[in-house]
Amino acid sequence: MASQSSLVLTIFSTTGPLPTTTWTSKVDQILPALAHEFTISTPNITSRFLDSPSPSSSSPVHRVHQLLLPTQSPATQPQCTSFLRTLAPQTDSLSLSLVLTPLSPLHKPPASSPSHPSRLAVFDMDSTLIQQEVIDELARSLDLYASVSAITEAAMRGEAPYTDFTASLQARVALLKGVEPGIWKHLREEVITFTPGARELVRCLKAEGWYTAVLSGGFVDLAEWVKEELGLDEAHANVLETDEGGRLTGRIREGAKVVDGERKRELMERIKGEQDVGGDAVLAVGDGSNDLLMMGSAALGVAFCAKPKVQERAPAKVNGGSLVDVLYLLGWTEEEIREVMARGK
C-alpha cells in the first residue's frame, strides 16, 4: 500500500460476485462524490480485487474490491464514517457496502516491509468470535431460554429498561441459579460453534505479530476456552459465583468487575499501553451496544453482523457473515489468507 495521506476504500457487493465491467460501472458512480469530498488525486487511484475469481464462472467475478485513494490532506476515521452515511442512499441502491478508512499501521504492509509496528486487535466473543449467546444457552439448560433471550436481545439493541448492561446481566444471571457445573463441557463439545472466518482472522493477525484479546460481556469459563482454541493472547469476561457443588448461584462473583462497555474500553486501553501499541494501531470488532465504546476508541471499530442500532453508531460495519471480511478491510487478499492457513498453527 502507498504512503501518506491516502484513504482505503473497501467495497463489498451485497448481491454476490460481480463481473469486472459491472464493478467499473458501479465504482464510477460513487467516485466523483468521494473525489470532491476528500480532494482525491483521481489519476493516481489504484485498485484490486481481494477475493479470488469464482471458479464456477466463465469470466472472472468478484465480491470484494479495494481502492487506494491518494488525498491532498489527511482525513480522520470519523470524517470517513460521516461521509459514508451521507452516501448510503446511493450505495444502497447500487447494492454496495462500503468501508472507508485512513491508511494506517492496521493495513497489511508490503511483503518487503522491514518491520511491523505493534498492533492490537480486541474482539467481543458472543455472536462475534462464536455464533451463540452463551447466557442464552445456559438458560436453555433450565428451560428458561425464551425469558433470558428476550432480555439479551433488548440489551443488545440498547433498549430500555436494559440500556444499563450491568442491570441486564444481573437480571439474566439471577435466572441461572442451579445450572450444573457440567454445562461448560456440554457447551464446548456440543453447542458452541466458531463464526466462519474466526480462525482465519486470528491466525493471519498473529502471523504478522498482532497482539490479540477477547473482551467479553459473557463468561470467563468459555472465554478462556475460546482464547486457547483460537490462539488469542488474553481473555477477559465475567466471573460467575458457584456454590460448594459447583452449581451457579445466580450471582456474579463478589469483587469481580462486570465487563460492560466501559470496562471493555478500559481493558483495551490498558492492553494497548502494556503492549506499547500506538493509538492508530488498534482494531476492535463486536456486535452489541456494549461494544460501541471500545469500537469508538479504537483506530478502527468494526460492527460485525450487528443489530441495526449498533450499525448506525459504529465507525464501520461488515455484514457478509464471515470474519474474513475484516481481513479484507485490512488489505489481505484471499490468496494471502490461504497461504497462512496452509502453514498450520
Image (cartoon, helix red, strand yellow):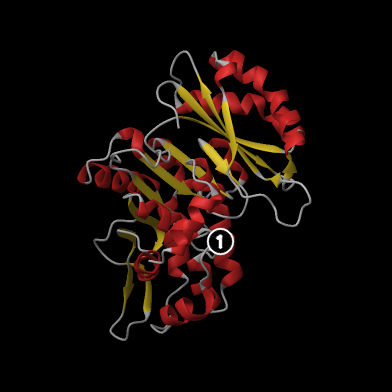
Residue 249 at least partly seen: yes
Is disc 1 surrounded by few (<14), some (14 to 19) or many (20+) residues within 10 Å? some
Q: Position of residue 253 (x, y in %)?
A: 29, 67
Q: Is residue 217 above or below residue 103?
A: below
Q: Secondary structure at mark 1?
A: loop
Which quarter of the image is occupied by the C terminus? bottom left
Q: Is residue 65 above or below residue 291?
A: above
Left or right: 160 with respect to 122? right
Residue at point 48%, 80% (across, down): 189
25 or 310, which lies in front?
A: 25
Find residue 236 and report its image quarter. bottom left
Q: Position of residue 126 (x, y in %)?
A: 48, 60
How many numbered discs sit on the rendered protein? 1
Residue at point 49%, 54% (across, down): 337
Left or right: 332 with respect to 298? right
Residue at point 57%, 53% (across, down): 154
Residue 259 at least partly seen: no
Which quarter of the image is occupied by the N terminus? top left
Find residue 13 and report its image quarter. top right
Residue at point 77%, 33% (across, down): 93
- The disc labelled 1 sits on which kind of residue? Pro
Left or right: 331 with respect to 318? left
Q: Is residue 231 above or below residue 302?
A: below
Circle 1 residue: 196
48 or 200, which lies in front?
A: 48
Q: Position of residue 248 (x, y in %)?
A: 38, 77
Q: Is residue 247 above or below residue 28?
A: below
155 or 201, which lies in front?
A: 201
Q: Position of residue 140 (x, y in %)?
A: 55, 76
